[in-house]
Image (cartoon, rainbow, N blue to C red):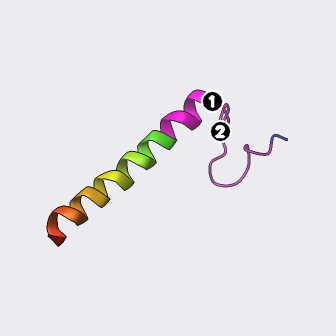
């Protein structure tokens, strides 16, 4: 069994580089948006 193919994210090609890159960009984009929003309202 592949290491990435278990737990709640169990689907085929879960460790495909394109899937990992896309989800990483989504997470980083969301974090960046929250930081920008927080800085906008803080000052």
Query: Which stretch did the figure color magenta?
Result: 3-23
Residue drawn at the location 68% of the way across and 36% of the way down = 15
Tally the marks: 2
Vertical order, 16 against 34 (above or below)? above
* Residue at mark 2: 11
- Please state if 9 lies on the left or on the right of 23 as rendered: right
Q: Residue furthest front?
A: 43
User: Looking at the rendered structure, which numbered label has been put on residue 17?
Assistant: 1
Residue drawn at the location 56% of the way across and 33% of the way down = 19
SS under mark 1: helix
**What whole-number distance in Å separates the C-alpha atoms at marks 1 and 2?**
14 Å
- Please state if 32 lies on the left or on the right of 5 as rendered: left
Q: Foreground: 18 or 32? A: 32
- Circle nearer the N terminus (1, 2): 2
Q: Residues within 10 Å of mark 1 (few under 14, many from 20)?
A: few
The N terminus sits in image quarter = top right
Q: How far across and how far down the image is residue 6, in percent?
A: 73, 49
Q: Residues within 10 Å of mark 2 (few under 14, many from 20)?
A: few
Vertical order, 41 against 36 (above or below)? below
Q: How far across and how far down the image is residue 29, in percent?
A: 37, 46
Q: Nearer the viewer, mark 1 or mark 2?
A: 1
User: Looking at the rendered structure, which numbered label has been put on residue 26?
Assistant: none
Vertical order, 28 against 22 (above or below)? below
**Residue 11, quarter of picture:** top right
SS under mark 2: loop
Q: How far across and how far down the image is residue 21, in percent?
A: 54, 34
Q: Residue furthest right?
A: 1
Q: Residue furthest bottom?
A: 42
Residue drawn at the location 67% of the way across and 31% of the way down = 13
Residue drawn at the location 65% of the way across and 30% of the way down = 16
- Please state if 35 lies on the left or on the right of 40 as rendered: right
């Amino acid at each position: 069994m592949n290491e990435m193919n278990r737990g709640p994210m169990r689907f085929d090609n879960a460790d495909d580089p394109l899937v990992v890159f896309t989800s990483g960009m989504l997470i980083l984009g969301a974090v960046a948006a929250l930081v920008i929003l927080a800085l906008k309202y803080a000052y």
